[in-house]
């Protein structure tokens, strides 16, 4: 009974809260549904079910398994696969004619339904991580209608091969190779499974070992070793191990890319071909492209890439004599190119995508079947000429003649686009998935105006006057355009949203919704999005060229007066960019000058303790040290935002008395955990003096789960998961909110009352507890774990704040109104009349997240790591931007949009009323006048 | 032999994965627009339970093609199970895995309540210890139905004729309109006696009398007062001024009415 009552109570409360309006949803907010950078070996076109149209499947570097519609590039379904280690490598395979795609990440092998992304089966191989995964395409005549079996290779020193049932994921057999060789790959032909492992010789060369396994029993039939140790020194030199083709091959080169060696698996012969570098440039990359279909002809293509040119050679395999021969060359072209293989029936087609052309050739002959120039795409905000990184293609061929080709191409800008016969169909901004930091940037206009005004103020009167006249004349040039747009704008504002003028240009709007969000990605890119027009990309640049394998993790974006200043992750120097255009600024602002001016003491995490030092480094010795108790380690440090305006210094109670807020700009919340005691401690510090203002400890906390925290105004919030080993208490997740006041007594300012100045070092003359704030705290059970917290920001701080929380499990962002987490909610009784007047509601131990609080409503945002907020020009509105994997942004008004007419305000109705009234007045006025005159004269 | 040693952990792990297997099934429910097979791929169930090694067990099972969530190899203990779906709310569940007879483990699923003590468990939804519905511990299947749907959106209060007429201001305005329009006809249709009575009454009423401060203020003759005239003589003066005054009154009135309507429009929101 009680839960129902509670639900009813919450439902009643919910009616007074605000939510996303149905017509605002999907209009005001924007969301980039991302998957991350696709990888060539895990991306392919595959029909949803046999005979139907193909869908693009990929397993990205973020381990997102996604199905992308080739028509418009929308996400059909996504699964975020969780890895135990921080690997970015996974495997994705689909059997021919199957309605299941099989993924393998770390120790998890799973089959997923192609149509809706539901799990078909899963298999856990434990601690090992999967080295290779293949689908068995057996031609033994015993094929059933069900799923085709998968073969996985794993193990670190002893290769283990398992055959998994394609319908259930159960192990059919297992083969363990106890030779101590490094497992490398598996390869399956129509009749045999080959296990390729690497044997390290004494001289550090690698010998390739091939064992053939019986697919039915899993027993080893045969084994041979290739003496490759003279030119093979590392596994990276193996460029290809073919799979699922009529005759799988192993191909490798030496370190200097001078010779290409090819072995047809199952045969000890090694064919060797000299690589002709075609000039002085050295070959940088050799890629082998072979079809993955068991029925297709056994032809393959080798792609050579130098710094400025690329070319390819096509080879044929004679199945009877087991020989490899070169068939023809594809000419050397300038720039970078990509090749992809596609099959249609038994025919194999190679699609070559250069910087400005798509060329399709058949594997049988070098005649060009189709050639399309790539249309220069519309400006996507990049200045650089993007090169193609890799592509996957699908050709449509009818009775040998090519009709169309579509390729999903990843370009160096991180864009993933589909090119159909040379024309770009859609473009996905997958570079945004690697966002590590983001910052808000004002549009420069008002800063420019302020600068001009300042100029006028400082020059002499005559110069200032001419300057002003010139400025006004310049402004006047915009008048015709403004007048031209005026009727359109008027119509737009009266006709509702349908005819509203879309602001394409980056211009300042009167509400301040147009702001730039500049994000830094882990690949060294800087991208600016316009928060006012659905997160459109304004510019997108490769700011820094990182060394391969490194990531730009701890970027700090400093934005001052239209300039973005960042530290180069490679050289360590600072670089500046114009926020509006992304162009590199000639002069670079110096870093840290602003922060040093405003703060005297900065703090930093030094090992296991927090240390406060002079910000200008004038004195190296620390001002203060904060060291958590024995056995505790600092889990997170959260500071109050630097710009956090507070409108009222007190809280007015129902009886008109005032509780004074403890407002300290230097609040820092430190959360520490103790692994042995399984406890969480929270310390609130003053970052200037380092003194502990408030501390508390929670026992029975699961310290392995996420603990998130935030500080704003005069309150703080943190959440944690209860340790479920202690069964007597409750289980689940908790949210704690604490509010700081100067004194427990209303109308009393505590020891600060008489002082006009305030010092962090000496809070008051009274020693002891008097200097500390009075803290009220309440805790609530919440239905889900909070992975990240943030607080809304408005221009003046008049609007009540909302606690924004990221729920990783339900892929959403929720804004909790302050009323529900006010720590002064009366416990165990209904609020008194004065408390009710203050807006306090009775305490309930559970906060259920009302669906109306979901900022993301029906959208599902995955992998959100952080939220940033920024005030708009309207006091009621706060801009929200969330990033991590997906990118989501919206604007919210925590206390309703009190300063702007909503969409429901019917302007036409108002106009009609006024008009009707006017007409009515004009009609009635003569009548009334006549009547009055008559009344007077008829007496 | 060495390979056997490598295999040993695998072999040991094998029986564990068979220990307790819990399947949560989503049968159709009588909730509008709820169709288990139409749930998005993100639908999943999470299990929070006793520690295994360093931290708590925290597992997630995606929705399978058969509309089920499968958890395998559950260790003994008490777990909190929650089903996460975008459009539907599911009540939290408690899963107890305990040692049963013959080395087998029993799995029981109960309702649980957030914010209550963990020992305070609700209705048993199924499991193996009862025997009847669950079967053996390897295949415990429990049906779960959503508690409610999620309604994310707030509806805008659009224009409604009924709510417009429910507004007291509009009602008052309408009433006075009826009075103004209908009064002359009523007066005309009145029989002479009642009419005389009514006129008498109106004369007597303080509103109509010249002593009424409001009336006096309205008919105040400034010029006359300046000239030191008495109130009795001011009558004629005002008669001449009548029409002009009337016009002013009408204009003022229209502005007022306009303001009033604008006010009404704002109140209506």
Image (tube, coloured by chain):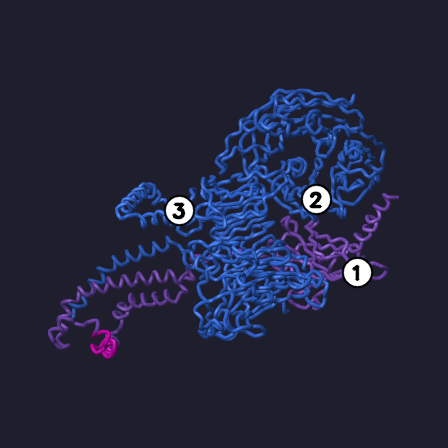
Q: Residue B208 magenta-drawn?
A: yes
What is the secondary structure assignment of the residue under circle 1?
strand
| Quarter of the picture holding the N terminus of chain B | top right
Question: Dot 3 corresponds to which residue?
Answer: A445
Q: Which residue in the protein does label 2 denote?
A: A105
Tags 2 and 3 in contact by the CB under 8 Å rule?
Answer: no
Element assignment for label 2: strand
Near-viewer residue (A279 or A739): A279
Q: Which region is colored magenta?
A: B196-216
Nearest the viewer among A73 and A768 is: A768
State the predominant SS element of the stretch in magenta.
helix
Residue B242, located in which quarter of the rendered image? bottom left
- How crowded pointer 1 is (Cα within 10 Å; few <14, some 14-19, many 20+) is rated as many
In the image, which disc is placed on residue B106? 1
Left or right: A675, with A467 as reference point: right
| Front-most of residues A66 and A37 | A37
Chain coloured purple here: B
Q: Residue furthest right?
A: B1
Q: Chain coloured blue: which letter?
A: A
**Residue A447 x, y percent position in the rendering:** 40, 48
Report whether A705 appears left or right of B9.
left
- Residue A702: quadrant of the picture: bottom right
Q: Position of residue A724 (x, y in %)?
A: 70, 62
Residue B166 can be seen in this image: yes
Magenta stretch holds residue A214:
no
């Amino acid at each position: 009974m009680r839960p129902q009552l509670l639900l009813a109570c919450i439902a009643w409360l919910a009616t007074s809260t605000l939510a996303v309006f149905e017509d605002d949803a999907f209009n005001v907010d924007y969301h980039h549904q991302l998957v991350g950078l696709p990888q060539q070996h895990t991306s392919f076109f595959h029909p949803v079910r046999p005979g139907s149209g193909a869908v693009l499947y990929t397993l990205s570097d973020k381990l997102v398994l996604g199905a992308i519609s080739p028509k418009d590039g929308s996400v059909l379904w996504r699964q975020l696969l969780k890895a135990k280690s921080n690997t970015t490598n996974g495997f994705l395979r689909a059997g021919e004619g199957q309605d299941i795609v099989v993924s393998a990440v770390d120790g998890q092998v799973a089959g997923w339904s192609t149509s809706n992304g539901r799990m078909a089966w899963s298999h856990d191989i434990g601690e090992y991580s999967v080295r290779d995964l293949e689908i068995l395409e057996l031609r033994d005549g015993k094929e059933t209608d069900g799923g085709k079996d998968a073969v996985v290779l794993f193990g670190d020193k002893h290769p283990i091969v398992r055959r998994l049932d394609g319908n259930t994921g159960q192990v059919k057999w297992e083969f363990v190779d106890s030779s101590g060789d490094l497992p490398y790959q598996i390869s399956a032909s129509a009749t045999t499974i080959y296990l390729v492992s690497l044997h390290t010789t004494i001289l550090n060369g690698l010998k390739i070992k091939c064992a053939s396994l019986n697919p039915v029993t899993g027993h080893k039939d045969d084994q041979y070793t290739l003496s490759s140790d003279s030119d093979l020194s590392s596994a990276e030199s193996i460029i290809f191990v073919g799979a699922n083709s009529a005759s799988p091959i192993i191909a490798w080169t030496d370190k200097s890319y001078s010779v290409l060696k090819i072995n047809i698996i199952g045969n000890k012969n090694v064919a060797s071909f000299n690589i002709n570098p075609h000039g002085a440039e050295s070959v940088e990359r050799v890629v082998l492209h072979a079809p993955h279909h068991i029925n297709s002809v056994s032809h393959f293509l080798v792609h050579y890439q130098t710094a400025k040119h690329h070319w390819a050679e096509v080879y044929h395999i004679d199945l009877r004599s087991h020989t490899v021969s070169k068939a023809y060359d594809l000419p050397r072209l300038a720039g970078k190119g990509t090749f992809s293989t596609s099959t249609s029936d038994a025919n194999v087609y190679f699609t070559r995508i250069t910087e400005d052309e798509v060329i399709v050739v058949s594997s049988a002959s070098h005649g060009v079947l189709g050639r399309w120039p790539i249309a220069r795409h519309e400006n996507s905000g990049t200045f650089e000429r993007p090169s193609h990184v890799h592509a996957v293609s699908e050709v449509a061929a009818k009775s040998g003649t090519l009709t169309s080709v579509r390729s999903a191409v990843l370009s160096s800008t991180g864009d993933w686009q589909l090119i159909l016969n040379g024309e770009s169909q859609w473009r996905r901004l997958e570079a945004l998935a690697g966002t590590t930091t983001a910052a808000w940037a004002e549009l420069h206009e008002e800063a420019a105006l302020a600068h001009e005004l300042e100029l006028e103020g400082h020059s002499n009167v005559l110069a200032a006057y001419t300057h002003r006249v010139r400025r006004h004349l310049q402004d006047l040039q915009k008048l015709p355009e403004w007048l031209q747009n005026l009727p359109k704008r008027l119509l737009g504002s009266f006709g509702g949203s349908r005819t509203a003028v879309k602001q394409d240009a980056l211009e300042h709007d009167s509400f301040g919704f147009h702001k730039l969000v500049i994000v830094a990605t882990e690949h060294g890119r800087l991208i600016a999005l316009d928060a006012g027009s659905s997160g459109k990309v304004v510019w997108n640049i490769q700011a820094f060229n990182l060394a391969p394998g490194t990531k730009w993790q701890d970027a700090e974006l400093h934005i001052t007066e239209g300039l973005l200043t960042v530290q180069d992750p490679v050289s360590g120097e600072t670089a500046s960019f114009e926020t509006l255009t992304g162009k590199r600024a000639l002069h670079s602002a110096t870093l840290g000058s602003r922060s040093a001016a405003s703060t005297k003491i900065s703090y930093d995490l030094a090992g296991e303790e927090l240390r406060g030092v002079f910000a200008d480094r004038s004195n190296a010795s620390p001002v203060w040290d904060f060291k958590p108790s024995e056995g505790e380690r600092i889990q997170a440090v959260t500071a109050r935002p630097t710009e956090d305006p507070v409108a009222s210094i007190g809280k007015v109670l129902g009886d008109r008395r005032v509780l004074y807020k403890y407002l300290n700009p230097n609040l820092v919340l430190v959360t520490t955990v103790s692994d042995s005691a399984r406890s969480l401690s929270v310390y609130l510090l003053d970052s200037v003096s380092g003194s502990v203002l408030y501390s508390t400890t929670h026992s029975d906390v699961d310290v392995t789960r996420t603990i998130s925290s935030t500080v704003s105004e005069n309150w703080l919030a943190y959440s944690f998961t209860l340790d479920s080993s202690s069964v007597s208490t409750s289980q689940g997740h908790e949210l704690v909110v604490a509010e700081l006041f100067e004194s427990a007594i209303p109308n009393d300012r505590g020891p600060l009352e008489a002082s006009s100045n305030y010092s962090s070092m000496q809070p008051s003359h009274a020693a002891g507890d008097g200097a500390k704030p009075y803290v009220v705290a309440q805790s609530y059970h919440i239905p889900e774990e909070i992975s990240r917290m943030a607080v809304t920001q408005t221009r003046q701080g008049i609007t009540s704040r909302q606690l924004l929380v990221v729920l990783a499990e339900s892929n959403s962002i929720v804004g909790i109104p302050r009323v529900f987490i006010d720590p002064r909610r009366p416990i165990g009784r209904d609020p008194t009349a004065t408390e009710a007047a203050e807006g306090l509601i009775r305490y309930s131990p559970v906060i259920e997240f009302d669906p109306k609080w979901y900022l993301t409503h029906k959208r599902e945002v995955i992998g959100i790591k952080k939220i940033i907020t920024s005030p708009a020009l309207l006091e009621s509105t706060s801009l929200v931007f969330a990033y991590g994997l997906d990118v989501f942004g919206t604007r919210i008004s925590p206390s309703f949009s009190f300063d702007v007419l909503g969409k429901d305000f019917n302007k036409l109705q108002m106009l009609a009323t006024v008009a009707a009234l006017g007409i009515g007045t004009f009609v009635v006025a003569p009548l009334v006048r006549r009547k009055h005159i008559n009344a007077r004269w008829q007496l | 032999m060495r390979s056997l040693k490598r295999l040993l952990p695998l072999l040991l792990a094998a029986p564990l994965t068979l220990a307790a297997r819990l399947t949560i099934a989503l049968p159709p429910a009588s909730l509008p627009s709820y169709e288990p097979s139409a749930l998005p791929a993100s639908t999943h169930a999470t299990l929070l339970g006793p520690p295994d090694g360093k931290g708590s067990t925290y597992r997630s099972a995606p929705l399978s093609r058969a509309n089920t969530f499968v958890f395998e190899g559950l260790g003994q203990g008490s777990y909190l199970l929650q089903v996460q779906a975008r459009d539907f709310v599911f009540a939290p569940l408690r899963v107890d895995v305990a040692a049963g007879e013959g080395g087998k483990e029993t799995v029981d699923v109960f309702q649980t309540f957030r914010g209550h003590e963990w020992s305070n468990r609700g209705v048993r939804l199924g499991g193996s210890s009862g025997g009847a519905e669950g079967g053996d511990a390897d295949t415990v299947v429990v049906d779960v139905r959503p508690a409610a749907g999620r309604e994310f959106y707030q509806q805008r209060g659009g224009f409604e004729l009924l709510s417009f007429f429910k507004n007291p201001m509009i009602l008052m305005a309408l009433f006075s309109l009826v009075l103004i329009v209908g009064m002359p006809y009523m007066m005309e249709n009145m029989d002479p006696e009642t009419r005389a009575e009514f006129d008498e009454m109106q004369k007597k009423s303080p509103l109509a009398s010249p002593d009424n401060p409001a009336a006096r203020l309205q008919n105040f003759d400034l010029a006359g007062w300046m000239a030191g005239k008495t109130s009795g003589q001011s009558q004629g003066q005002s008669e001449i001024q009548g029409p002009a005054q009337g016009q002013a009154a009408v204009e003022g009135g229209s502005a007022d009415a306009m303001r009033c309507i604008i006010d009404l429009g704002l109140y209506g929101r």
